[in-house]
Image (tube, grey):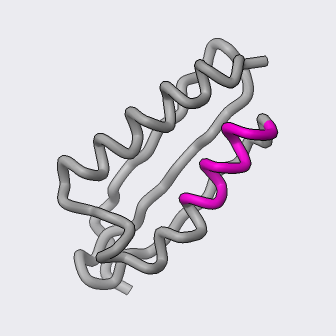
Amino acid sequence: MKSVDNRKYQVKNLLLQLNQFDIKPNMFPELKEFHLACKDYIQNGIPKSGKIYLEVVKRELQYILPISEHINASINLKCKDK
């Protein structure tokens, strides 16, 4: 099981990656679900994965927040037209 510090570090890196693509929570209200999942992951160690469609940029955010030590948290922005 990952430590709280490890989970914080990994989530911080995911948010930095999103920021590099100019994907910020204030611009995308649909990211609220992702941020709630990250908060629960950090505080309680609850693993989660999911997909969120970002209408404005026509991308799907796929995320994995694992609890296993050997698997890193990750995101993927996939081009997708609904």
Q: Position of residue 30 (x, y in %)?
A: 48, 77
39 shown above or below 78: above
Q: Position of residue 7 (x, y in %)?
A: 61, 28
Q: Quadrant of residue 54?
A: bottom left
The furthest residue to the top: 70
SS assignment for the magenta stretch, majority: helix
Of 81 and 10, the residue lying toward us:
10
Among the 4 quarters of the image, the one containing residue 46:
top right
For residue 50, above or below residue 80: above
Q: Is residue 62 above or below residue 42?
A: below
Give me the residue at 55% from left, 58% from top.
35
Q: Which residues are magenta?
A: 35-44
Could you tell me residue 73's position as x and y percent?
Answer: 54, 33
Give left or right: position of 58 versus 63. left
Q: What residue is at 79 percent from the left and 18 percent from the top?
A: 1
On screen, residue 10 versus residue 40, left or right, reads: left
Query: Does the magenta portion include 63?
Result: no
Image quarter in which the C terminus is found: bottom left
Q: Which one is in front, 53 or 22?
A: 22
User: Total number of numbered labels?
Assistant: 0
Residue 65 vertical placement versus 7 (above, below): below
Q: Residue at x 30, y 76 (%)?
A: 27
